Image: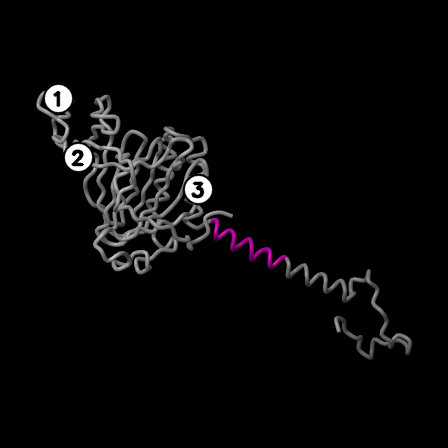
Amino acid sequence: MGFEMKPEKDVLSKDQCKVRSPNPNSVNSPRIKKKKNKNKKDTKKKRRVMLRRKRSDDSPVRRLFDTCKEVFSNGGPGVIPSEDKIQQLRDILDNMKPEDVGLAPTMPHFRPDYGPEDGSSPPITYLHLHQCEQFSIGIFCLPPSGVIPLHNHPGMTVFSKLLFGTMHIKSYDWVVDAPMRDPKTRLAKLKMNSALTAPCNASILYPEDGGNMHRFTARTACAVLDVLGPPYCNPEGRHCTYFLEFPLEKFSSEEDNVLRGEVEKEGHAWLQERDDNPEDLNVVGALYTGPKVED
């Protein structure tokens, strides 16, 4: 009933035995008690929501998002974050695991038979986590033999974290002050030509250093978490350009001054800008279903 009748020994008269309508202002009012109970339930509910939100805020992917906001807050094309900020973001990425973003090697994106049967490169799945003017976060899911062709990152600082698997990386930087062979062909110096196996630390490339142009080839099923600052933007001239790779002797001669000095050493190639997308480029988008990135 919401309130209790008094025991017989507390009854002083017949009139007092009659149940009276409770005073709404009384502390013993059932209406007040219900309101108090409701307030307690609301408080408990709020605490549970706050606890879940706190747990979400403490997740690795949320820490990554918050750190990216800080690191790239004053960024822009060609702007490299300070060493302290670079290390701050690198520390977050170095400790990230596949499960932090809801991935596992057994998922359909990584199956060897998940692709065409004509011998071409199997499809690569891209999971979009976040993009704003300052930075973007995404994951490339590569089945075995998946290839991301040689491409550039104009004016960007890029962090790449191999979450699992083995991937071969070949990367180049432009040779400074070297004359162009033609408007679309430039001399480049090899930066990296080796395989990485997870777990490993994040790699970083810069607008003009660190292997700004690279190609990924999956030796096994693998996943790469990429942070780009700033992201690609066609209207602002930051579009992704793909390149053909030619050996040094392809456009060179013994009398060519470009080949004198250090350029004569091994580890150089001509990179020619492509007019179209590579035939082996096969990237499809999919919905990211991992932990929440932002509110």
What is the three-letter code of the residue carrying label 2? Phe
Q: Is residue 49 magenta?
A: yes
Is residue 251 toward the left or the right of residue 183 in the image? left
Please rate how many residues cluster around mark 3, counting C-alpha atoms within 10 Å: few if below 14, some from 14 to 19, many from 20.
some
**Frontmost residue, 70 versus 114:** 114
Distance of label 1 from label 2 (alpha carbons)? 16 Å
What is the three-letter code of the residue carrying label 3? Gln
Magenta stretch secondary structure, dominant: helix
Distance of label 3 from label 1 (alpha carbons)? 45 Å
Instruction: Give the extent of the magenta segment.
Output: 43-57
Residues at badges 3 and 2 in contact (C-beta under 8 Å)?
A: no
Label 2 sits on residue: 246
Residue 256's x, y, as percent? 12, 21
Residue 37's x, y, as percent? 68, 63
Circle nearer the N terminus (1, 2): 2
87 lies above or below 219: above
* Residue under the image location 64 percent in, 58 percent down: 42
